[in-house]
Amino acid sequence: MKLALLFALVPMLCSGLDRFTALSLIETGDNDAMVGRAGEISRYQVMKNEWRAITPSTSYRNAEVAKQVAVKSSTNVFKD
C-alpha cells in the first residue's frame, strides 16, 4: 500500500503539483462530494469533528474552503 502511494505521489510532485493538489487527487480524484466510509468529508477527506474545530462553515463541497481546512488541519497535526 505504501509503495503504491509512493508510485502515485512521485509523478504528481515531479509534474509541479503542490502537495494539497496531490493529496486531493489521491484521496478523492478531486471529487468534492466524496464522503468516506468513516464519514470523512470534502476532497481532502477530513473528519467532520476536525472540520468543525477549524471552521463553522458547512461548505464541504467548496474547494477553497476545503483547502483552507486541510492546510489548517495539517498545521495542527504537525506542530511541535
Image (tube, helix red, strand yellow):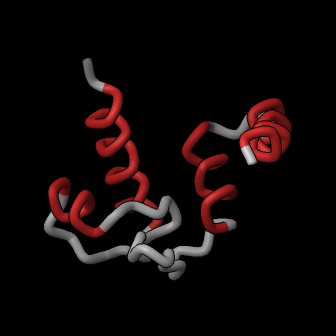
Indicate left or right for 46 with 56 as reference: right
In the image, residue 68 above or below residue 12? below
- Residue at image x 53%, y 78%? 34
- Residue at image x 66%, y 47%? 22
Residue 75 drawn at (x, y percent):
32, 33
Rendered image quadrant of residue 66: bottom left
In the image, residue 67 above or below residue 39? above
Residue 52 drawn at (x, y percent):
18, 64
Q: Nearer the viewer, residue 49 or 2?
A: 2
In the rendered image, the residue lying farthest to the top is 80
- Residue at image x 41%, y 72%? 41
In the image, residue 37 above or below residue 66? below
- Residue at image x 49%, y 78%? 37
Residue 70 drawn at (x, y percent):
39, 50
Rendered image quadrant of residue 17: top right
Indicate left or right for 1 with 18 as reference: right
